[in-house]
Amino acid sequence: MFVDIGVFLMAVSFAIFAVFFAKNLWRLSFVAKSVGETAKQMESSFNGTLDQVEKVLDNTHATAMDVEVKISALNGVFYTVGEVGHTTDLISEELNDLTVGYANGRRVEGEKPFIRIIQGAEFVKGVIKSWKRGQTV
């Protein structure tokens, strides 16, 4: 009889153990399912992030190309400025030679129109200065 009671208690304890073990396995399956769904969501989120990064890189490339085009367009402007500087240098050399000629008392062909232009400019400057002085009074 004690053997029967012992076998019965062992069977009951095994049944209780099996129920708790099945319950824990059931919960573990829900956890595994939740982890799987989370991994799928992370994968889709990661794909979305990669798409956004790709768009940012495309926009960056477009911006870099735009800057390159604008810089190449400015090359002509800098070339033109260089040519203007060269031309200004030539003009100033000619004016310097002309001024040295006047300082040495040398007569230059066509100097009278040049002198008249300078006198006219000085006269206009004096008129404008007088007119501005009259406005402030």
Image (cartoon, grey):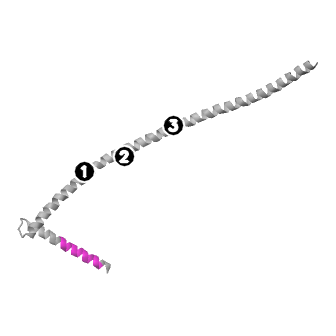
The secondary structure making up most of the magenta span is helix
Distance between the alpha carbons at the discs numbered 3 and 2: 25 Å
Q: Nearer the viewer, residue 3 or 58?
A: 3
Residue type at the position of mark 3: Leu
Secondary structure, mark 1, is helix
- In the rendered image, the residue lying farthest to the right is 1
The residues colored magenta run 121-134
- Residue 119 lies in magenta, yes or no? no
Within 10 Å of the Cα at label 1, are there few (<14), some (14-19), or many (20+) other Cα atoms? few
Q: For the residues marked 1 and 2, what is the alpha-carbon distance in whole angstroms?
A: 19 Å
Q: Residue at x 23, y 53 (%)?
A: 82
Distance Cα–Cα, label 1 vs label 3: 44 Å
Q: Is residue 7 left or right of residue 37?
A: right
Query: 72 or 19, which lies in front?
Result: 19
Horizontal side, residue 59 vs residue 84: left or right = right
Residue, disc 1: 79
Quarter of the C terminus within the rendering: bottom left
Q: Residue at x 30, y 49 (%)?
A: 74
Q: Which mark is residue 46?
A: none
Q: Amino acid at mark 1?
A: Tyr
| Residue named by callout 2 | 67
Q: Position of residue 28 (x, y in %)?
A: 71, 30
Q: Which numbered tag is attached to residue 50? A: 3
Where 25 falls versus 80 (above or below)? Answer: above
